[in-house]
């Protein structure tokens, strides 16, 4: 019986780790990340050749979507569950709104894990070439993080351009 469990469990674990490696291979190294502090942390300004990536995962249905936006306004949405990709361009007014939202956001790190089991998990990465920022939040920690307006804006595009 234990051989049957191992025959099923080990390949599933290998797939899980491969999936994690796929996503996290594009994340910055620890030296590149600005670690949160006790006080509010300003996000990198969106100047030069910048990129924003937000990954939404979890929830009851096991969602796994990634949205990437570059300074040129190029927008890519990838749904890992359906293996579908959408490429579009963010309108100039929405791109300007995004730049304003990032400039006005200040990140407050959660003091402790929320313990939410079926929440969505949001991983936000901002890179402007000189500075990198990364934060991981869930539905419970998001409202107090200072990033709610920014993630609400980005979340509108996770299902596809409007």
Image (spheres, rainbow, N blue to C red):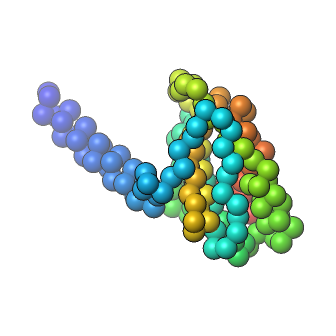
Q: State the residue at coordinates (67%, 73%).
A: 48
Q: Position of residue 68 (x, y in %)?
A: 61, 63
Q: Is residue 125 above or below residue 92?
A: above
Horizontally, is 23 left or right of 67 in the view? Answer: left
- Residue 89 in the image, given as x and y percentages of width and height: 73, 73
Report whether 140 appears left or right of 23. Answer: right
Disc tally is 0
Q: Say above or below: 113 vs 23.
A: above
Q: Is residue 53 visible?
A: no
Q: Quadrant of residue 75?
A: bottom right
Q: Residue 147 or 59: which is nearer the viewer?
A: 147
Q: Residue at x 27, y 48 (%)?
A: 14
Residue reaching furthest bottom? Answer: 72
Q: Position of residue 162 (x, y in %)?
A: 80, 61
Along the horizontal axis of the image, is 78 left or right of 89?
left
Task: Choose top left, top right, bottom left or bottom right for residue 99.
Answer: bottom right
Residues 86 and 152: in front is: 152
Q: Residue furthest right?
A: 93
Q: Residue at x 56, y 30 (%)?
A: 118
Q: Quadrant of the N terminus?
A: top left
Q: Is residue 33 visible?
A: yes
Q: Residue at x 72, y 57 (%)?
A: 157
Q: Nearer the viewer, residue 160 or 125?
A: 125
């Amino acid at each position: 019986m234990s051989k049957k469990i191992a025959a099923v469990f080990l390949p599933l674990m290998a797939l899980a780790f491969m999936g994690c490696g796929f996503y996290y291979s594009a994340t910055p190294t620890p030296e590149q990340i600005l670690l949160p502090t006790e006080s509010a942390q300003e996000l990198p300004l969106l100047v030069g050749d910048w990129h924003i990536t937000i990954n939404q995962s979890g929830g009851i249905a096991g969602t796994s979507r990634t949205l990437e936006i570059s300074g040129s306004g190029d927008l890519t949405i990838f749904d890992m569950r359906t293996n579908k990709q959408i490429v579009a361009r963010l309108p100039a007014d929405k791109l300007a709104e995004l730049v304003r939202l990032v400039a006005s956001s200040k990140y407050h790190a959660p003091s402790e894990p929320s313990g939410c089991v079926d929440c969505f998990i949001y991983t936000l990465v901002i890179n402007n070439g000189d500075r990198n920022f990364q934060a991981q939040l869930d539905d419970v920690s998001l409202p107090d993080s200072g990033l709610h307006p920014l993630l609400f804006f980005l979340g509108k595009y996770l299902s596809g351009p409007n």
